[in-house]
Image (cartoon, rainbow, N blue to C red):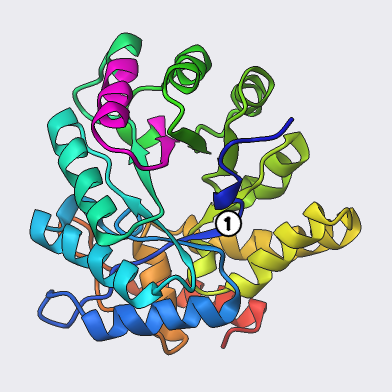
Amino acid sequence: MARRGEMFAGLSVALVTPMHSDGSLNESMLRTLIDFHVEAGTDTLVPVGTTGESPTLTHDEHERVIAITCEHAAGRITVMAGTGSNSTAEAIRLTASAKRAGANGALMVTPYYNKPTQEGFFQHYRAVAEHVDLPIVLYNIPGRTAKNMEPETICRVADTCPSVVAIKESTGLMDQASQILSASDLTLLSGDDSLTLPLMALGASGVVSVAGNIVPKDVKAMVTAFKSGDVMTAQKLHHQLFPLCRDMLGLSTNPIPVKAAMKMIGMDCGEVRLPLTALTDSQLAALKTTLQRFGLL
């Protein structure tokens, strides 16, 4: 089956938001990161998602990060801007702003905290799609939003809204992924690094990766190997990456560990904003060991 969102296939990196020691945006480092991913062969950048600390950026900062990313990408790499909100009006505003900035698409998390009904999810996405003509990637992560958008609702959105082209699947449920892939032509992207290869075996087209912030070439190589039919190489790369993903990303809430890892390997993007807090000394020691085992230190 031809899938409608293959412009976002491959490796998308959920970009961290670099900050200075005083907590302000580090725009110079953001541009450096964009260049790094262009050179590494990353297919798509995803600014101001969860990894980009969207919950603690001001609205002006949120739009500024997207604008810089689009401007500096300059057509060299695809940009899927995080524009989700638990307010439909706010989601429309952010998505329209991303379109004006030149984003190629919008990653839209399901409304969080207020726990819409399935009808509410449907009406939310339909409203954004009707107001802004930009490819939309659904983002379903009930572990953070407190409610699952059911496969039937996802397929209903896809059937009603042609501009909804893909989904970042972060439920961890293989059956749910299978239902979506079987009943729709949406492109499915893994939202969990450790599940990328299993989901690709079901028909997923790639990943929105956190680990890709530090090892984009390795993640891209795994995705490319599987897509080219070299399953053994993809499996080998998966097993190499798995301990890194498990031991780094499992230390604390994303993006705390990946920002700490980036600092350790010489890509200092500053600290996380409250209410997120830095790793403890024992966690930092464990992270250092993990990075050493992977050959990054």
Q: Residue at x 61, y 46 (%)?
A: 6
Q: Residue at x 25, y 60 (%)?
A: 101
Give coordinates of residue 5: x percent, y percent: 56, 41
Q: Residues within 10 Å of mark 1 (few under 14, many from 20)?
A: few
* Magenta-span inclusion, residue 194: no
Of residues 129 and 120, which is closer to you in this image? 129
Is 83 left or right of 259, judged from the image as shown?
left
Give coordinates of residue 191: x percent, y percent: 52, 45
* Magenta-span inclusion, residue 139: yes
Is 104 left or right of 71, judged from the image as shown?
right
Q: Residue at x 80, y 54 (%)?
A: 226
Give the tally of numbered discs: 1
Report if residue 253 is visible in the image.
Answer: no
Splitting the image into 4 quarters, where does residue 272 fall?
bottom left
Magenta residues, start to end: 121-142
Q: In the rendered view, would you say 70 is above or below 49?
A: below
Image quarter in which the C terminus is found: bottom right
Q: Hey, what amino acid is under mark 1?
A: Arg
Of residues 271 and 217, which is closer to you in this image? 217
